[in-house]
Amino acid sequence: MKHKRLWRIIRQILGASTFILITLLFLDFSGVLHKYLSFLAKMQFIAAFMTASVTSVVILIAILAVTLVFGRVYCSVVCPMGIFQDGMARLGRIGRKNPYSYSKAKNILRYSVLVVFIVVCSMAGFAGLASLIEPYSAYGRMAQNLFQPIYLWCNNLLALIAERVNSYAFYEKEVWIRSIPTFVIAAVTFVAIGFLAIRNGRTYCNTICPVGSILGLFSRFSLLKMHIDEEKCVGCDLCTKNCKASCINGREHLIDHSRCVMCGDCMAQCPQEAIDYKHIKWTSEFAQKRAEDAKVTEQKPEKVDEGKRAFTLTSLMLLAGAATAQTKVKLDGGLAKIEDKMEPKRGTPIVPPGAHSLKDFTRRCTACQLCVSKCPNDVLRPSKELTTLMQPRMSFEKGACRVECTACSEVCPTGAISLITKEEKSSIKIGHAVWVQQNCVAVTDKVECGNCARHCPAGAIMMLPIDPKDESSVKRPVVNENKCIGCGMCEYVCPSRPYPAIFVVGEEEHEMI
């Protein structure tokens, strides 16, 4: 009995450690932790699958090999969404003794979702719709949109306290919502999956999650499985009532190994030590499955789980009902309104240096929000377009893409943003600046500004007279597109409101200049 409890304790320690470290990877805005923890992001199944590299192939083979030996331990130890559900399920068990019951696998639903997921990924790249149900991306959005603001508020409180004692151990960081639709999706995901986990354990894992469905197919053939010894079992049904995957039929001594995540709760609860984790021949399991299917035909039809149905419908409806961003108004001493900058309409969206091209980036990005949470200049924010929903795009209302920063390329787990050096970044053309005459103060107010030219790191902007025949006329900016790299510094420092007088349009294909 001791070794069975030990298995459960080890699994819980490993799972909790992974969950905390992955969460910190999203919360940390200093860029320090990603140097040590970025490997955790690359260990995620879909992230490794989307990366065309030797390392990703090794990771995929390792995950599948571990599954074929130990079963779906990946879902209990590595996947942050799976561990999140375990935590919420633990909350749900407070005040509820033996809260779960056996339910037949919803194979039509789970494999239909898997097929649609694969079709969407193969036909349209990793589109926003597919990333809605991918576990690592879904958890990443929750961490970045819901948990990080709380983390930043705590940091700002410490910064305020440190300031009072003349300490610079902490510095203040602005807290802002980068995308209302993405925030709403993250909130709905948190509520829906949290509710289902509190109520029924791992409902999402075994009905919607594509990774769970894929690994479930492999875990049917794993060497080690949970097994009920019929001679020792007294039919107390405690294993069934404590299985958060609802995969144990204690009365019939059957376990659905495609849904079992090897958490060990059943072993810990069995008073007769009738459940063990050992090698079982596949032929025996097949015979058990046939017997189970035969008995299910004699049972009464199950009631429809309204919670699962509501989760599926909510996931589809939130796309159409996402809120639009609100316009903010600031007051300067109560004397004048200062308008915030608004994002101009760009003909082509801007994707980060290292993405190579808009098409390749859209195909490979899983919208996990890790690069968004790590961007120190607040340049990256999730897309609101339906076809690229929640994938990061660049805009320069709050900062510019500084040539010395390569944070996004260092943390991307899928290779959608390739690792680049600072020297390479200064030469990568991701867009070009466009001057808007009717917004420029040189035209509207007849005042010479020159902010864009002074701050351009590429020296791509010159100030020339508006009237070529009059050298003394007010000067306006002229962009040399051959030298412009699209960093957005000109757009960021432009004083025109609400729309800048100069802004960046993205390039379909990035190039070195």
Image: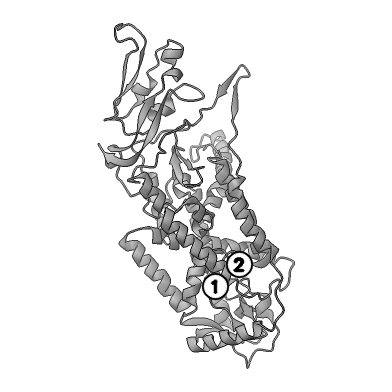
Indicate left or right for 346 with 469 as reference. right
Q: Nearer the viewer, residue 116 or 79?
A: 116
- Pointers 2 and 1 in contact (CB under 8 A)? yes
Looking at the picture, how far across and down is residue 316, in whole percent? 59, 53
| Dot 2 or dot 1, earlier in sequence | 2
Looking at the picture, how far across and down is residue 340, in whole percent? 54, 27
Q: What element carries label 2?
A: loop
Indicate left or right for 437 with 92 as reference. left
Looking at the picture, how far across and down is residue 73, in whole percent? 50, 72
Numbered tag placed on residue 198 in the rendering: none
Would you name the residue on which mark 2 appears? 202
Q: Write the residue at 54% across / 60% down.
A: 81
Q: How crowded is mark 1: few (under 14 residues within 10 Å), some or many (20 or more)?
A: many
Q: What element carries label 1?
A: loop
Q: Name the outermost residue toward the left.
A: 513
Q: Which of 13 and 61 is in front in this view?
A: 61
Q: Write the residue at 59% across / 38% down.
A: 324
Q: What is the CA distance from the residue labelled 2 to the residue labelled 1?
A: 9 Å
Q: Which of 196 and 224 is in front in this view?
A: 196
Numbered tag placed on residue 261 in the rendering: 1
User: Amino acid type of disc 2?
Assistant: Arg
Q: Write the residue at 50% across / 65% down.
A: 114
Q: Name the outermost residue toward the bottom.
A: 231
**Image quarter in which the N terminus is found:** bottom right
Please say whether residue 316 is visible from this viewpoint: yes
Please say whether residue 14 is visible from this viewpoint: no
- Classify 280 as above or below 167: below
Looking at the picture, how far across and down is residue 44, in whole percent? 44, 61
